[in-house]
Amino acid sequence: MTYRRSRTGNPRPHELPHYQALLDDTDWASLATACGTGEALPTALASIIASDPAVRAAATDYALREVTHQNTIYEATVPVALYIAATLNHPAIAADDADVPPHRPTLVRLLEWLSDTAYDADDECVAIGERHFGKGFLDEDREMRAFRDLRPAIFSAVHLLLSHDNADVRDAALVAAIPLAEHPVLTAHRAELLDHARHLLATSTDRHNRDRVLDAMKAWGHDTSALENADDIAARERYARLKAERDSWWAADGTGGYSEDPPF
């Protein structure tokens, strides 16, 4: 299945369309989602930029749930991602709106979804797909390929938030920018991202964000030992232990053929 649009062609990889054009020009009903097709997405996406925080939160819940399941990039994922990126600086979202319990600020939640989606289409995921399905994996997974091609456009919106006044927004933007910056035309931004990464490590205790940043710095060839704290070291050792246990479980008898669940 492919990413299709009703009245316009695919946007240029480095150009972020206007959110209203995406809403109007996408044939949402023809696009697969986690739960069916996307005919209800236009209403939900339009409500993400509503002035009422409660309406915004409910719409965000619905729209993201439609394209989030088991790390899969669906047909509707690409236009949803582009729409979200195009609205990150909309006045209703860009402001550091107050939490609406149990929801987090819309801007942070949208950045976190973009981050998760970018990691679901990153180079590591492609390598895993190629090991299992061959070198033509991306030719078959057209939705993932479409998302990867449009990373520069999405990055252009995320990049603007790296210096946001709110620390949660800045950190969420950085963690989203890191996998997007794997695109060849964005690698020049890594030096800037490293500066933001060092600042995050000096100020944040968030385990998820620290792990993402440390992993990226190591992948880019930087020694992080001076930046790690005791919790980072403990987490790294725990992850290594769990990985060893998992690998041992799968290697048992050469088949992974245990009758019990693996130890994780």
Image (cartoon, helix red, strand yellow):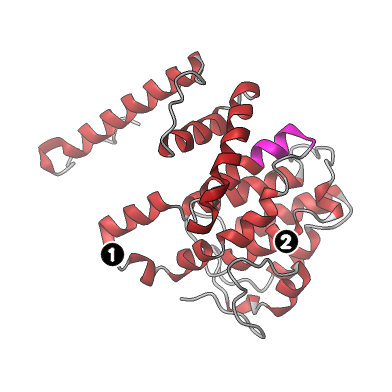
Q: Is residue 259 rendered to the left or right of residue 32? A: left
Q: Is residue 257 above or below residue 50?
A: above
Q: Is residue 119 rendered to the left or right of residue 50? A: left
- The one nearer the camera, 168 or 77, is 168
22 in magenta: no
Name which residue type carries label 2: Ala
170 in magenta: yes
Q: Please name the predominant secondary structure of the magenta segment in the image.
A: helix
Q: Residue furthest top?
A: 230
Q: Quadrant of the C terminus?
A: top left
Can you identify the residue that label 1 sits on?
135
Name which residue type carries label 1: Lys
Dot 1 alpha-carbon crowd within 10 angstroms: few under 14, some 14 to 19, many 20 or more: few
SS assignment at label 1:
loop
SS assignment at label 2:
helix
Q: Is residue 161 above or below residue 225?
A: below
Please provide the residue range marked out in magenta.
Answer: 165-172
Q: Position of residue 130 (x, y in %)?
A: 30, 59
Q: Position of residue 258 (x, y in %)?
A: 19, 38
Q: Residue furthest left?
A: 253
Can you identify the residue that label 2 sits on?
86
User: In this view of the protein, can residue 6 be seen by the observer?
Assistant: yes
Q: Position of residue 35 (x, y in %)?
A: 56, 64
- The one nearer the camera, 136 or 162, is 162
Q: Is residue 8 rendered to the left or right of residue 119? A: right
Q: Is residue 57 above or below residue 46?
A: above
Badge 2 or badge 1: first in the primary sequence:
2
Q: Is residue 156 rendered to the left or right of residue 125? A: right
- Asked which quadrant contains residue 140, the reply is bottom left
- The one nearer the camera, 108 or 60, is 108
User: In this view of the protein, can residue 70 be seen by the observer?
Assistant: no
